[in-house]
Amino acid sequence: MVEQSGPQGELHDLPQAVAAPRSRRSLQLVWLIPIVAALIGGWLAVKSITDRGPTVTIAFATAEGLETGKTKIKYKDVDMGLVTNVALAPDTSHVVVSAELVKEARRYLVEDTRFWVVRPRVSGGTVTGIGTLLSGSYIGMDIGLSKTPKEQFTGLEVPPIVNTGEPGRTFVLHSDHAGSLDVGSPLYFRRLKAGQIMSYDLDKGGNGIAVKVFVAAPYDKFVTDNTRFWHASGVDITLNSSGVTINTQSAVSLLVGGLAFETPAESADQQAAAADTEFRLFANRGEAMRNPETDVMKLAMVFEESVRGLAPGAEIDFRGVVMGTVTRVRPTLDVAGKNFRIRVAADFFPRRFRARDRGNRMTNDQRRALLAGMIANGLRAQLRTSSLLTGQLYVALDFFPAAPKVKPRKDVRLEDDDLPEIPVVKSSLVQLQDAITAIATKVQKFPLEQVGTDLQQTLRGASKLIDQIDKDLVPELRTTLAEVRKAVESADQVLKPGSPLSQDARDAMREVARAAAAFRALADYLDRHPEALISGKRADPKETGK
Amino acid sequence: MRCPRCGAALHLRRPDSVSRSWAFLIAAMILYVPANMLPMMKTSSLFGSQSDTIMSGVVYFWTSGSWYLALIIFFASIVVPMLKMIALAVLLVSVQRRSRWQQEQRARLYRLVETVGRWSMLDIYVVAVIVALVQLKALATIQPGPGAAAFGAVVVLTMFAAMAFDPRLIWDAREEKHG
């Protein structure tokens, strides 16, 4: 019983499982899980959407080094985004890079924000982007200052020299040619590196180039309206009376070219120039530091001779000092005179006459009056040859007191502009030419042919005469000569020493000499004894005493 | 009912099997999206930093020539969890509809799902090991991304969903017919 009931009894000993009412709570709790999951998912979704930054497209010439999903966009080395797509433009001329930027970058995407690919680069004497050799290229970014949002950009092919916000100012220099300049070439101020060339561009007409330079902060205040910029590339060798001067800015500028600027001492106290002021870029320091040419007086000269060799830029010279330049040479029609004249306009720099005399600037009327007085004194312009090899001309101003007086040309207005005109004198070459021409004309007028025929006739007559002489005179002359010789010979015979004639002659001469001696003794005696003339010769006591 | 010894709740059937299973499954499905979208791990080295999702890892291995690795990751981390969720959904729907279609196959499918579940944690293990190993400070560090957490949650939730599912429900439809 016990054994049988054992298990039963054990079973009965066990506490009975109690049916518990099913709680609905567990069900509710279990559904919390998908709700939480949904919340997390939803939050992630919302976050990813709100975190999603703006997408930009950047056009580049080439996608070299750009990889989808890998190439980053960095600003000051902070990640700003990632390249999401690199595609060829529809016209295959460039590539279009799409990139997703971080959320905060939206307000930086403005009109003048710039993008460029950072690659290892050697330029302007500097090496940049070495880090990208290992990490691969990235897209650099420079945030602009504009407020206009933009989402499509054109990437720069070269990194900008100057980042937005860098202290300093940009200026524009105008030059005839770029020389050996390049983007990034240095700009020196007293041989300190003060800036860089940002870009250069052809002028609209292609007549020159405009170089944009950046002058960094401490130096930019030295750029005034009167500052001169010049090419400092290479070596500037000057040969003058003090010897050879060699000027160079730095070894770098020897290699990659460069610019320099300086403000003339007398205008250093001026206000700093405004940003983007335009300057002229001079070829060298000497040219740049010449006296200010801010004061320009325009003059005109009308030439009637050839101006071949006179080009705009030619010098106006006053006794060897350059006082201005020719700005324009153009023929003008002189309707009244039915003639063409060549009118040369020139810039004249009156300040060069009195560089130290600042301040009291004459008015234009005063200047004209002064000029008129000078013209009355004989001030004239004359074309002169500066180089016989090239035939280059320059205009020389000088006083020619002998020059004929001119009255101001008023009847003929050659140009609309009313420039004071300097009368001209012919160039010495032309004067010489005139003289030669005059001689040539006279020579031409000389009746050479007539003279020739006359001369021929004369010669013919002369030759006839000579013939006659030859025929008639010569034989007679010959006989005469023979006779003369005979006479001479006989004379010779007679006159020979030892000949009787000469002997006689010598005797005679001796006689004469003796007679002369006797005469002298007589004269002597008479001198001492004049009474002898009357009394005759007395016996001499002395002679008798002896 | 409670176990008189240990006090654990006793059930003749798993309670609320279908709804619990649905709850876990739906949660898993929701988290499956961020698990695939968000980066699994962030690698930063000398040469820059990079974050990879599961799919980008697969693509990386495939393009770099390790196609077998790519296939393993693809199946273990993308296909299997997805198939598991689809299988569970199919089971749940068929049970709710009291379908008598392919009951034996469905029972086998359930067993397969339960077995295979834990293998999907492969990715998580790999990430965990790599993150622990590669901490070379300046040279290279690897950190788990939010995707790893989501993915782990997906795997765990699908396992819970499979556990909550009562396979006997598959056969209920047959009994009803008999009864």
Image (cartoon, rainbow, N blue to C red):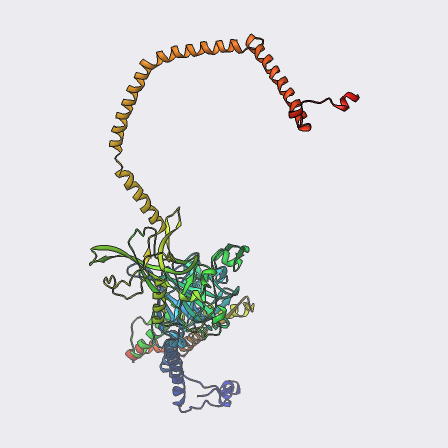
Say which quadrant the C terminus of chain A sits in: top right
Apparent side of residue A76 relative to residue A39 in the rendered image (left or right): right
In the image, is residue A531 above or below residue B145? above
**What percent of the width, then of the height, locates residue A272?**
45, 74
Q: Residue at x 57, y 10 (%)?
A: A504
Q: Residue at x 47, y 12 (%)?
A: A488
Query: Can see residue A133?
Result: yes
Q: Nearer the viewer, residue A277 or A106?
A: A277
Q: Residue furthest right?
A: A546
Query: Can see residue B53?
Result: no
Q: Nearer the viewer, residue A214 or A238?
A: A238
Q: Nearer the viewer, residue A40 or A189?
A: A189
Q: How many marks?
A: 0
**What percent of the width, then of the height, locates residue B64?**
43, 58
Apparent side of residue A262 relative to residue A418 in the rendered image (left or right): right
Q: Residue furthest front?
A: A535
**What percent of the width, then of the height, locates residue B91?**
34, 74
In the image, is residue A538 above or below residue A225? above
**Which image quarter: residue A347?**
bottom left
**What percent of the width, then of the height, locates residue A196?**
46, 65
Q: Nearer the viewer, residue A109 or A88?
A: A109
**Which image quarter: residue B115?**
bottom left
